[in-house]
Image: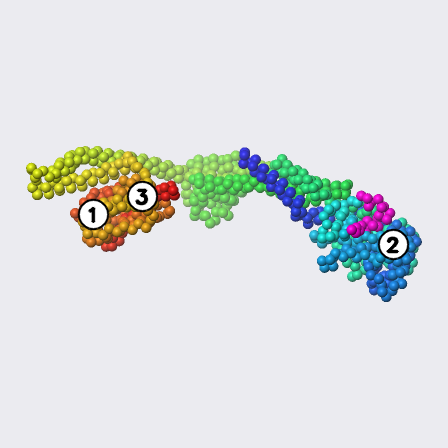
């Protein structure tokens, strides 16, 4: 339960973080713009008929010549339009430089601007290299005109959707041309401009009050007249009465195009078209703006919370439908909010969280479901193939669909054909002496809507007896009780009897084996007890023999022993000590096998262990003319975690054997090395006769002397067995490597005292 709550908490946290990141980074802006453009089409209204565009079109260029025209032509247009009493006139032309060839034309245009109502002229703010430049009309024109900036901004996808109602460069502030035109009749709008505010300048250029244009239904258009038709009098003056007249370039190739989300024929808009679209929004009071970032963020979090709640309330079965409905509600909310309050809410972050909530919520369930299905499928196959009964599934007409391993084994001779054959082509069944087709029995079980059971029937194939078996035929039904097939279960009675006999034989074998193990354990225990008791019984008289021999060795001045008698006493004493050592070895072996030996694990310096053993063995080696070489490159501070007494016993056993079985004038080498980081290997190498591989395998067994009993070398053959078991009791190990005619190397690995060595 705690794990489930933790998983839910992690999912909620992940979705909230996703909403925050997507809202802050605007990573899904393309999707947001696409939704905005779709909603533009749904909310678009017909173009305003209060706006008239006077076009500098191809017809006008053919009549007045190539662009730019002398300014007296524009003066004639103003002189023609102003008496018609339009609401406003805007010329989307830049008159920033004087016409040196036609100064009288400049003067005439200036008089035309001064003689009537103010005309709106454009201001262009742009960069010339790294320098911000304002391009204004001539001063004599500016004096009598209203100025508005004609700058446009492209979104990140290259589409122009918005304008800045105000643009500031230093101390100069310019309204957008649509706003300047609209404010001529509605100056009150300048006191409370709509749009998204910007407080930080951008490289000296400050745009403020950004609004998104609603554009207009592309199936409609503004009233358009040719510049040439107006001057020729084809268009009467009363046509412009109470209209907003916009004059601009529309001829192809002489005016830059602005891609827009809505346009007639999906073509780019010219500058005058874009000014008209902005003025259209102002006239309809439908200029839109994005929600402030904080409200966008809070609303995204709220909708993300709704998405999270949806993902936890609904079951995985209904979750896709709930996600779809909630997504549609979010999109509808955006549309309603845009239509009623003219605020645009970017829904992509909320939709992404909502869509992400579905796999995050359901993946665990689907994963468990899939794992469960696979596990059940695997379990079913394993179960079917493990049981000894043959299982066959067929269609309702008897065609085979599946057979388990036992069934395949029954018809192994027809295995290659079984997958595509009819059940009657595989075998028939004989019941009470009558032969039946299995397909007929399948139809009978389907007709009875229940299983049919036949005990002790005979299965045959091509008149060849297969087995005696119990047969069960069970019908399978699908939806609405429609029969879809059957399941045949074949229980081989002969196999069952064989299995019963095998199990009985196995049980008998296990009983005999258990009796043998118990008897072996009893014999081993009796042997250990016998060795222990006999060793104790032998030690008592042996100690007396050794004691009396030691008394007889004492020099008595009054009654000295003859030299021959003293030699005999020495032999008695030596033999007694040897026999005592053998008895001690037997006692050690008995204690180890009975588990009664106790070890006193302590720390001993490696150098101390080697030095003590070297001191004891050196005289024996010298007496036999052997050279004892010790090579210990390890640190003197190395400490072993062993029973010091038993460690010396192991090493002395190796060294004494090296002395016993060495050749005259040979050598004995004792070397050390670190193994595996926590062990030390002590190796004793002699120059004796060596051992064959078969002898090495028997070396550490009890009472194995490997032919040494045919020599004069004393021993019982249990020293190495004790050595091996003592090393293993101290978590160590022993081993041997030998080459016949060259010599042998016996080694023991003992544990390092890690704590002592670290300190």
Question: Residue 667's spot in the image, x, y percent?
Answer: 23, 52
- For the N terminus, which image quadrant? top right
Please give the label number shown on residue 605. 3
Disc 3 to disc 1, how far (Cα)? Answer: 23 Å
Tell me the crowding category of disc 3: few under 14, some 14 to 19, or many 20 or more residues within 10 angstroms, Cα based.
Answer: some
Could you tell which of marks 3 and 1 lies nearer the N-terminus? 3
Q: Secondary structure at mark 1?
A: helix
Q: Residue at x 79, y 45 (%)?
A: 193
Can you identify the residue that label 2 sits on? 144
In the image, residue 44 lies in the stretch drawn in magenta:
no
Q: Which circle's residue, 2 or 3, is located before the other in the chain?
A: 2
Residue placed most toward the observer, 500 or 555: 555
Viewport quadrant of the C terminus: top left
Magenta region, residue range: 171-192
- The residue beneath circle 1 is 619
**Magenta stretch containing residue 189, yes or no?**
yes
Give the secondary structure at mark 2: loop
Q: Percent from the top left, x then y, of residue 298?
A: 68, 40
Query: Residue at (29%, 44%) from the top-left corner?
Result: 608
Which badge, 1 or 2, is on the more N-terminal residue?
Answer: 2
Above or below, 644 against 134 in this view is above
Left or right: residue 621 compared with residue 17? left
The answer to whether one can see residue 121 in this image is yes
């Amino acid at each position: 339960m705690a794990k489930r709550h933790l998983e839910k908490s992690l999912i909620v946290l992940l979705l909230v973080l996703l909403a925050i990141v997507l809202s802050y980074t605007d990573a899904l802006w393309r999707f947001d713009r696409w939704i905005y453009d779709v909603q533009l089409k749904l909310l678009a209204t017909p173009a305003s008929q209060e706006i008239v565009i006077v076009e500098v079109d191809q017809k006008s260029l053919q009549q007045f010549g190539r662009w730019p025209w002398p300014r007296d032509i524009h003066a004639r247009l103003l002189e023609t339009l102003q008496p018609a009493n339009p609401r406003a006139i805007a010329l989307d032309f830049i008159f920033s430089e004087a016409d040196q060839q036609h100064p009288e034309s400049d003067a005439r245009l200036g008089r035309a601007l001064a003689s009537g109502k103010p005309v709106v002229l454009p201001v262009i703010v742009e960069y010339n290299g790294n320098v911000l430049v304002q391009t204004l009309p001539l001063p004599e024109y500016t004096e009598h005109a209203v100025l508005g900036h004609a700058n446009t901004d492209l979104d990140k996808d290259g589409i122009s959707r918005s304008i800045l109602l105000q643009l500031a460069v230093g101390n100069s502030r310019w309204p957008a041309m649509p706003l300047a035109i609209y404010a001529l009749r509605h100056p009150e709008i300048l006191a409370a401009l709509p749009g998204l505010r910007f407080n930080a300048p951008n490289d000296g250029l400050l745009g403020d009050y950004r609004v998104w244009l609603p554009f207009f239904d592309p199936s409609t258009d503004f009233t358009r007249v040719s510049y040439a038709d107006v001057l020729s009098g084809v268009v009467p003056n009363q046509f412009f009465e109470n209209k907003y007249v916009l004059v601009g370039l529309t001829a192809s190739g002489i005016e830059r195009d602005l891609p827009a989300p809505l346009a007639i024929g999906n073509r780019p808009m010219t500058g005058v078209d874009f000014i008209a679209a902005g003025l259209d929004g102002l006239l309809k009071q439908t200029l839109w703006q994005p929600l402030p970032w904080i409200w966008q963020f809070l609303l995204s979090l709220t909708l993300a919370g709704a998405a999270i709640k949806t993902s936890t309330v609904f079951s995985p079965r209904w979750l896709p439908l709930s996600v779809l409905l909630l997504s549609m509600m979010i999109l509808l909310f955006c549309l309603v909010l845009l239509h009623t309050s003219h605020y645009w809410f970017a829904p992509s972050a909320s939709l992404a969280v909502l869509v992400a909530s579905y796999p995050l919520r359901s993946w665990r369930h689907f994963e468990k479901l899939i794992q469960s299905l696979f596990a059940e499928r695997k379990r079913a196959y394993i179960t079917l193939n493990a049981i000894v009964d043959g299982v066959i599934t067929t269609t309702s007409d008897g065609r085979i669909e599946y057979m388990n391993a036992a069934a395949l084994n029954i018809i192994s001779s027809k295995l290659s054909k079984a997958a595509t054959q009819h059940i009657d082509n595989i075998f028939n069944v004989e019941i009470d002496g009558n032969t039946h087709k299995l397909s007929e029995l399948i139809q009978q079980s389907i007709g009875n809507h229940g299983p049919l059971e036949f005990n002790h029937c005979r299965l045959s194939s091509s008149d060849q007896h297969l087995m005696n078996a119990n047969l069960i035929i069970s019908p399978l039904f699908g939806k609405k009780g429609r029969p879809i097939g059957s399941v045949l279960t074949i229980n081989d009675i002969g196999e069952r009897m064989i299995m019963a006999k095998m199990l009985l034989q196995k049980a008998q074998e296990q009983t005999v084996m258990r009796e043998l193990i118990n008897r072996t354990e009893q014999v081993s225990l009796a042997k250990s007890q016998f060795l222990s008791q006999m060793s104790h019984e032998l030690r008592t008289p042996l100690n007396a023999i050794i004691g009396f021999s030691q008394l007889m060795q004492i020099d008595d001045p009054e009654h000295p022993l003859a030299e021959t008698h003293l030699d005999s006493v020495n032999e008695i004493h030596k033999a007694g000590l040897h026999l005592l050592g053998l008895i001690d070895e037997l006692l050690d072996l008995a204690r180890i096998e009975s588990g009664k030996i106790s070890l006193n694990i302590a720390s001993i310096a490696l150098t101390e262990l080697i030095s003590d053993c070297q001191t004891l063995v050196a005289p024996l080696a010298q007496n036999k003319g052997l050279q004892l070489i010790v090579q210990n490159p390890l640190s003197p501070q190395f400490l072993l975690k062993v029973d010091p007494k038993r460690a010396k016993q192991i090493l002395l056993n190796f060294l004494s054997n090296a002395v016993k079985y060495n050749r005259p004038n040979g050598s004995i080498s004792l070397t050390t090395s670190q193994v595996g980081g926590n062990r030390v290997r002590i190796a004793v190498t002699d120059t004796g006769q060596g051992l064959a591989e078969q002898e090495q395998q028997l070396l550490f067994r009890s009472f194995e002397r490997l032919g040494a009993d045919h020599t004069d070398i004393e021993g019982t053959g249990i020293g190495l067995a004790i050595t091996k078991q003592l090393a293993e009791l101290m978590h160590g190990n022993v081993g041997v490597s030998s080459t016949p005619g060259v010599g042998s190397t016996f080694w023991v690995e003992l544990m390092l005292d890690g704590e002592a060595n670290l300190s």
